[in-house]
Amino acid sequence: MSLKSTLSGTGAALVTPFTQNGQIDFNALEKLIHYVINSGVNYVVTLGTTGETPTLDKSEKKDIVAFTTEIVNHRAPIVIGIGGNNTHELVNELQSFPLSSAVAVLSASPYYSKPSQDGLFQHYKALAESSPLPLLLYNVPGRTGRNLTAATTIKLANEVANIAGIKEAHDDMNQCMEIMKNKPADFLVVSGDDALILPQIALGFDGVISVAANTWPKQFSTMVNLALQGKFAEARAIHFSLLEGYNLLFEENNPAGVKASLFTQGIIENILRLPVTPVSEQLLHKIKQFNAQLA
């Protein structure tokens, strides 16, 4: 199954808002979902790592999926994140988790374990064979400690039927070019790096699963769509207007940066779960200033 048309453009990797007492803030989540969809994002990604999934229990995850499905209400495709470093547990989760509302599963590579390329291949093969939905690889070596190479990505794309695409978050443009050069025609390739999506679209990327699309959905999705239409001069102007913002969002931590930005916009509380803490007052002030001048 090809997802190239369904998941083209901008996907917002939704944060998980929390209340002051640390519970999931469903009112804020509803506000956020309406904000990003009404501002032009093409789809939403729930339970991605930007949603602080390592700190959510299984019951909370199911509640978030059910609530997100209800609020999205068929207005945009939904992608659900299911990843980790316990292959057996993930296989069971894929077979039991409520996935009927989604079009695909996004699975981050195993963290900490640092498997070989064969280990990564076998891990993703096992997940794909167990998943009732198309599986999207997620290569984010800065978080996981191990790069999913272009060669392994292409091998998975060609040899495992249910693997439909990749979110590529390695900043190595040579690796990106190798993937684009050798991938199957219907294999979806989206970026996991907001600051690189403009040049990556020039290479042929289909879009991006974005952190910035939480807080600047209109500007960011407009930029991506312009680039996909080949209107690079117009897209470049928006890209440069957001460039400082990208750096601010990731200066101390993600999702602390984007949560701080959404807080200054009055959409969510500036609350995170340990071990992640809110950004410093100095960075919060810079983010607030940036949002004020962007508006």
Image (cartoon, rainbow, N blue to C red):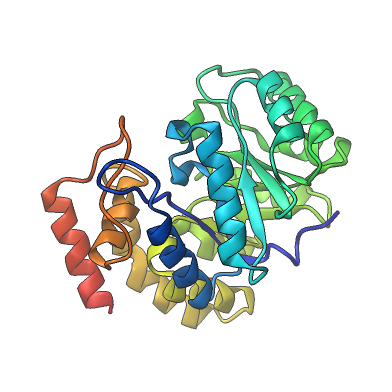
Task: Indicate the quadrant containing the N terminus: top left, top right, bottom left or bottom right.
Answer: bottom right
Q: Is residue 47 visible?
A: no
Residue 227 lies, in percent from the top left, at 57, 74
Left or right placement of residue 143 versus residue 160 in this view: left
Q: Is residue 295 above or below residue 154?
A: below
For residue 67, which quarter of the picture? bottom right
Which residue appears at 67% of the width and 63% of the height? 77
Left or right placement of residue 67 versus residue 26 in this view: right
Residue 219 lies, in percent from the top left, at 43, 75
Task: Indicate the quadrant containing the C terminus: top left, top right, bottom left or bottom right.
Answer: bottom left
Which residue appears at 65% of the width and 18% of the height? 116
Residue 114 lies, in percent from the top left, at 56, 19
Which residue is nearer to you in this view: 272 or 257? 272
Which residue appears at 27% of the width and 42% of the height? 21
Q: Is residue 188 visible?
A: yes
Which residue is nearer to you in this view: 77 or 233? 77
For residue 68, which quarter of the picture? bottom right
Residue 253 lies, in percent from the top left, at 31, 42
Left or right placement of residue 73 versus residue 30 in this view: right
